[in-house]
Amino acid sequence: MRARGTVTATIAAAVAVGALLAFVVARAGGPEPPPAVDAFLAAWRRSLTGTYATHQVVERRLVSGRTFSSEVTLAQRPPDRIRVDSSGTEGRVGGRRFGCVPDGGCRFGGDAPPYAKDVDDEMGLLRAIVASETPLYATAYSDAGAGCFLLVLRARVLAPPYGEDATFCFDAATGALRTSVVHRAEATDTTTTVDLRAGVRPSDLRLPPELRRAS
């Protein structure tokens, strides 16, 4: 059973988004998406195309109160990109994809497609979720001045990608995701950035040693 405070916050968020949508429809005379949708999509695209290195802590708090945490590092200077988390390392460097799993080694995965295609593919999926004729999530500003957006689930679906509601905040200088909070039925996932640099060092985008030897 979800904690009372989380339920209250979710209801309040849903009411706020509903009021925003009603206002926009009334002013526009039709079911046009609110301006927050376009701004959210633009912020997400910028997070995919910016140059930065970030270190984040991800905490999952179950409804039982138990917590689990992990760390994520991401270095990005398009078209090169490397992401490391508890499941392993994946990325694209010098036009080639690669992946590593803990205790399982690393392998090249062939030539990487144009980076713009990767970005467009991800944006297409996100647009279908928040900006289709029947979007899965309603989108509003959580704190426009801080680059924060609120998504609230509009329909009952199995395993919604961003839970029942989610807040995403983006860094103004780099475009990187700064924080996110995703409320799911079984847990709350919180991502917090503990280090963020606009400058990407050569070491940030260096291939794992065994791939350097193989390349």
Image (cartoon, grey):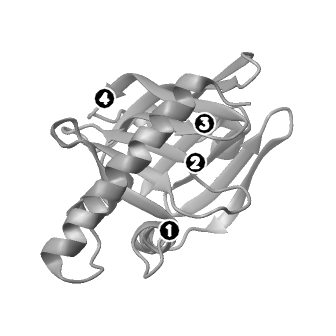
Name the residue beneath numbered marker 3: 84
Q: Residue at x 73, y 36 (%)?
A: 186
Check contact, mark 2 vs mark 4: CB within 8 A: no
On the image, the x and y values in percent for residue 38 come to 26, 66
Disc 2 crowd rating (10 Å Cα; few below 14, some 14-19, many 20+) is many
Tag 2 or tag 3, which sits nearer the N-term? 3
Q: Label 3 amino acid?
A: Val
Which residue in the protein does label 2 denote? Answer: 164
Mark nearer the viewer, 3 or 2: 2
In this figure, which residue is indicated by the disc labeled 1?
A: 129
Secondary element at image label 1: helix
Labelled pair 4, 1 in contact (Cβ < 8 Å): no
Name the amino acid, label 1. Ile
Point 67% across, 67% down: residue = 110
Disc 2/disc 4 C-alpha distance (Å) = 31 Å
Asked which quadrant contains residue 71, the reply is top right
Q: Residue at x 20, y 64 (%)?
A: 23
* Left or right position of 198 against 12: left
- The reply to whether residue 127 is in sight is yes
Q: Give above or below for 53 relative to 62.
A: below
**Nearest to the observer: residue 47 or residue 3:** 3
Specify which label sits upstream in the sequence, 2 or 1: 1
